[in-house]
Amino acid sequence: MGQALSCSDPETRVDRAISESLRKEYKSLANSALRLVLLGPGSSGKSTIYKQAKIVYKGGFTEEERSLYKQVIHANCIDAVLLMIEFLRKNKEDLMTEDLRELSKPVLLADRASELTRELGERMAGIWKHPSIQYAYEERARFQLSDNAGYFLTHVTRVTAKMYIPTEEDVIRSRFRTSGIVETQVMIEGVRFDLIDVGGQRGERRKWIHLFQTVQAVLYVAAISEYDQVCAEDNTQNRLTEALVVFQDVCKRMPQTPIVLFLNKQDLLYEKMKEKKSPLSALFPEYTGGFEVKAAIRFIEGKFLERAGQRDIYVHLTSAVDTAVMRKVFHSVRDYIIRKSLTISSLV
């Protein structure tokens, strides 16, 4: 029979010492906040993920906070109509029919800084249903139309009602450009995280450098549905290509910092693949998966991992507008970041 190990055996004492160190380090992590920064190009979904963290871990938005988004949502509706009208005028003037011109006149004169009236909302609902506008919407990859356009124009009579208070889904889908740095603290299963959101447009990225030495992990967000769209700041640069370039730069600048890659907007990628209008091979001729969603995702993921070199990248497929999905993602990311933090501390 084998002999039982004594508690005084050197190996047992070492194991216990390591376990005790791990417990102390974990307790230290629980008592201090880990700083996470959301990085990625503009319109990738960083701010949506930031809002989801507030919903999942801070009780969501109060009615007063949601009310503050009303004007933002109204401006999103106006911008969507104006952009589609402008697209038709520049590219399909023959579709600017007389009835559409009449319908759109009051909207073209609307003040983005003011709340929309119910009358304007009903007019915009008519514009949204117009065949010419539906054509423009189908061609949305050709101009800078926000992802939330279809959602808010479908609900435009509701969001312009007199007593309208935005829902949490409305808040999640609302869109305004992030400028500067915003930060919130969330508690995820006993561990505090400082979550930092920064603007993703080129002019905002110079502010990123100040965060590189002060964060414990990067959450890099890339919109995988934008393979057929160009950047708002540069209409010669493809959005997905831009995301790859920026990702590679972040990997080089932060060689020791754990990186979680969110391949975001999988729901919109699915829609595009289903429409079969924009082949991924137009951007990447070597891609041979056609309109098969899983093949497209594997290929795009591979492109990002190529840019990471030999680094260990934790990849998550996400749809940032889906709270249930993001709840699971946050849980998984929390465990990963804690493990990596312990590893960096040379305890694992």
Image: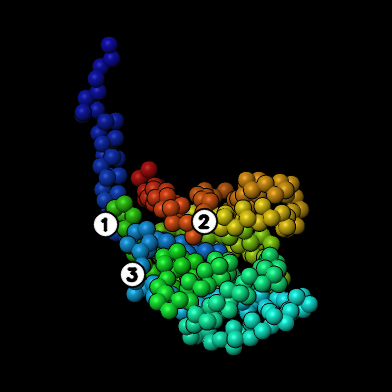
Question: Which residue shows up at 66% across the image and 56% down it?
Answer: 272
User: What colour scheme was applied to this rendering of the protein?
Assistant: rainbow
* Kind of element beneath mark 1: helix
Distance Cα–Cα, label 3 vs label 2: 24 Å
Among numbered discs 1 and 3, the one appearing first in the sequence: 1
How many residues crowd mark 2 within 10 Å: few (<14), some (14–19), many (20+)? many
Residue 83 at x, y = what percent?
64, 77
- Report the mark closest to the observer, 2 or 1: 2
Viewer-proximal residue among 141 and 39: 141
Q: Which amino acid lies under the numbered mark 3 shown in the image of this protein?
A: Thr
**Residue 264: quarter of image:** bottom right
Among numbered discs 2 and 1, the one appearing first in the sequence: 1
- The residue identified by callout 3 is 62
Q: Which mark is residue 319?
A: 2
Question: Which residue shows up at 62% across the image and 49% down it?
Answer: 297
**Residue 184: quarter of image:** bottom left
